[in-house]
Image: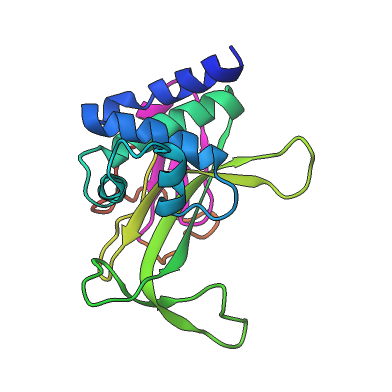
Amino acid sequence: MTGWGAWQALLAAFMPVFNAPMSGIFLKVAGAWVACPGRRTITRLYALAEPSGERAHDAYHRFFREADWQGRGLWKILATLLVAAFHRAGVIPLDLDDTLYHKSGRKVAGAGWWRDAVRSTGTRVVHGFGLNILVLTLRVEPPWGGEPLGLPVNLRIHQKGGTDAPGVGARSHPGDRRLVPGPFLFCVRGRLFCAAFGRRVPAGGRADLAYPPGCGHL
């Protein structure tokens, strides 16, 4: 299946995580995201998704801010589709890293002062205020060569004193598949485990740690 039919089938896979009103907005947002040239802001997406203005502009802001849809369910479906497309058999390579999303304000849940990896150097550590986001990616070797691509398959907002690390378990990929550990990750008997955030697991380190609180299966 190719073309428009393949696009519709891809989006249909995500329908179970949305209720009826939000599923319609999701379909329009997805189409507008692909077609939008330049920076993808909600205002620009709205102009493409609602050329006749059938829905209010605020409905699209609510979709991202407070709509009733299952984020974890969406990541699970996405991870399953990507693994099926790029790693049908053998090893499933994953990487986990954090990034600082600069966000200021008095009512930003989870915001704090974090190390800014982009502005920090080997001799100078720079901190910034914002959200510390943990992103779990599926490693894909592009056919044109060069550096591997990291396709997001899960994310969590890490808060001070918390261990909300995203995890992928064997239930998502049954059989004799192995998950290759990246930073902060290691694998035992087909199950992926997460060390506490900020603690790298050394080569040959202990393999009997349990999931920390907040780190579960997709």
- Furthest toward the front, the residue is 52
Residue 160, horizontal then vertical, whole percent:
27, 71
On screen, 216 above or below 112? Answer: above
- Furthest toward the bottom, the residue is 124
Residue at left 48%, top 39%? 32
Foreground: 53 or 39? 53
Residue 216, horizontal then vertical, whole percent:
29, 43
Foreground: 53 or 146? 53
On screen, 135 above or below 28? Answer: below
Residue at left 79%, top 42%? 145
Viewer can see residue 87: no
Residue at left 54%, top 38%? 34
Quadrant of the image containing the C terminus:
top left
Left or right, 26 with reference to 9: left
> Which portion, as a residue range, is magenta?
171-196
Viewer can see residue 173: yes
Foreground: 8 or 187? 8
- Within the magenta stretch, is there residue 173? yes
Left or right, 25 with reference to 175: left
Left or right, 40 with reference to 170: right
Residue 113, horizontal then vertical, whole percent:
35, 79
Left or right, 22 with reference to 52: left
Residue 141, horizontal then vertical, whole percent:
69, 39
- Within the magenta stretch, is there residue 121? no
